[in-house]
Image: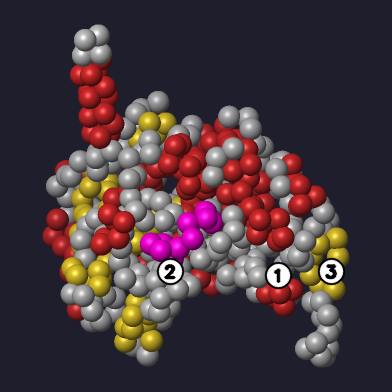
Amino acid sequence: MRLRPILPVVLLLALAALLRAEAPPAATAESVGLSSERLERLRAGMQRYVDDGRVAGLVSYVTRGGRVVHHEAFGKADVEAARPMTKDAIFRIASQTKAITSVAVMMLVEEGRVGLADPVSRYVPAFATTTVAVPAPAGAVAETPVSAVAAKRPITIRDLLTHTAGIGYGFGVAAAQWKAAGIQHWYFADRTEPVASVVERMAALPMDAQPGEKYVYGYGTVILGVVVEKVSGLTLAEFFEKRITGPLGMADTRFYLDPAQKGRLTTVYAAKDGKLERAPDGMPGQGHYVDGPRVAFSGGAGLVSTARDYGRFLQMMLNGGVLDGVRLLSPKSVELMTVNHVGTLFAERGVADAGKGFGLGFDVLLDLGRVGRLGSEGAFGWGGAYHTNYWVDPREKVVALVMTQLLPAGGSDLHGRFQTLVYQSIVAPPPAGAAAGKR
């Protein structure tokens, strides 16, 4: 009898949690400074990609000032099965996992359990001594063994967050040695051993560059996922669910799908010779996200998610680390994550990256003229190997993401066109006080 008064309280708390997890409220375009007529261009533009056979289907999602102004599904989630794309379709987000892992690391930094200047070896001792591969001299025969020199300094947590640790994906100068060790490519979902075991072996291999001297995109965030596990005592999947995706109501964001979610997983297609073909099963193709070993939780490229789920995560970042009263980070941490940390190293990758820098897990737009397309200086974002993409614009208070499954993408211009169509719809400043998070 004494339990009866408690039951309504429990139900109310559960209801409150569900309400917090709802998508941001919808808004008319004009109420947040957009043109509904111009926003229609975005819808029509996305539909053309389907009609022209450049993607099988996609979901696009835009908020301004914390309110949804566009969330639509186009085309098919599976062409052969004639399954239509839906707004709650689940996508493999690959490297969009990196942003969530980076937030996990910064949460531990805020708790005083990790330091950005800490050597990685404090958490993964195998990295106490690392080496860097030295290219073979010009004219050397292919069989010439790769030599290595000692790293000039220890690799730090900040090096890993900024991809300046010199660690690639195993295809650099010492590719043969990485291949022999069974460590190449970003894909981990088919592995039958924990990621930590792979990372331990990784430390003994020659890296691609000296720490801090070059931007080298690769396993850095995978290693950070192991750091999170070591410090927290949880698997990365458990940490995400307990500390990030659970509190933010991201119920469809996880490393491996539950059986009930299988019917919403979008099929991967490959762009070849101007046509779409169903990607093969296995790695990376359709992947092992349903029937895989469920052992490896890669912080670099392992999650599946929905547009709505990932949009909530990005809204938290735009709000300065808080969403619906749930605070993950302080505004100062978000500020630090979304400024350039690497000087010109990121821009030196090539013309496509001119005018940009890199922060703690995100690229950052530094020079609008150098970038040469619609946007705002200070906007930050990234994407995934299956052709998903997102960005956050603090100046315009915009969150935008487009989700499709195309690997390889065959030179698709979807991301750039999507960005242009979003920005051209903005005709006025956002409402005063928009997207202000609770502190």
Was residue 291 drawn as part of the magenta stretch in this picture?
yes
| Percent coordinates x, y for residue 346 in the rendering | 60, 62
Look at 29% across and 79% down and name the residue there.
Answer: 54
Was residue 49 drawn as part of the magenta stretch in this picture?
no
| Percent coordinates x, y for residue 398 in the rendering | 32, 49
Look at 24% across and 43% down and name the residue there.
Answer: 23
Crowd band around label 3 with a 10 angstrom C-alpha radius: few (<14), some (14–19), many (20+): some
Look at 27% across and 54% down and name the residue there.
Answer: 260
Q: Residue furthest top?
A: 2
Q: Quadrant of residue 198?
A: bottom right
Q: Quadrant of residue 265?
A: bottom left
Element class at badge 1? loop
Q: Which residue has dot 1 on it?
A: 181
- Amino acid type assigned to the residue bearing label 2 in the image: Gly
Q: Which residue has dot 2 on it?
A: 287
Crowd band around label 1 with a 10 angstrom C-alpha radius: few (<14), some (14–19), many (20+): some
Q: Is residue 333 left or right of residue 86?
A: right
Look at 77% across and 61% down and name the residue there.
Answer: 204
Magenta stretch, overall SS = loop
Element class at badge 3? strand
* Residue bounds of the magenta highlight: 287-298
Q: Gap in Å between the C-alphas at discs 1 and 2?
A: 22 Å
Q: Nearer the viewer, mark 3 or mark 1?
A: 1
Q: Which residue has dot 3 on it?
A: 148
Among the two numbered marks 3 and 2 on one chain, the one whose residue lies closer to the N terminus: 3
- In this view, the residue in front, 198 or 37, is 198
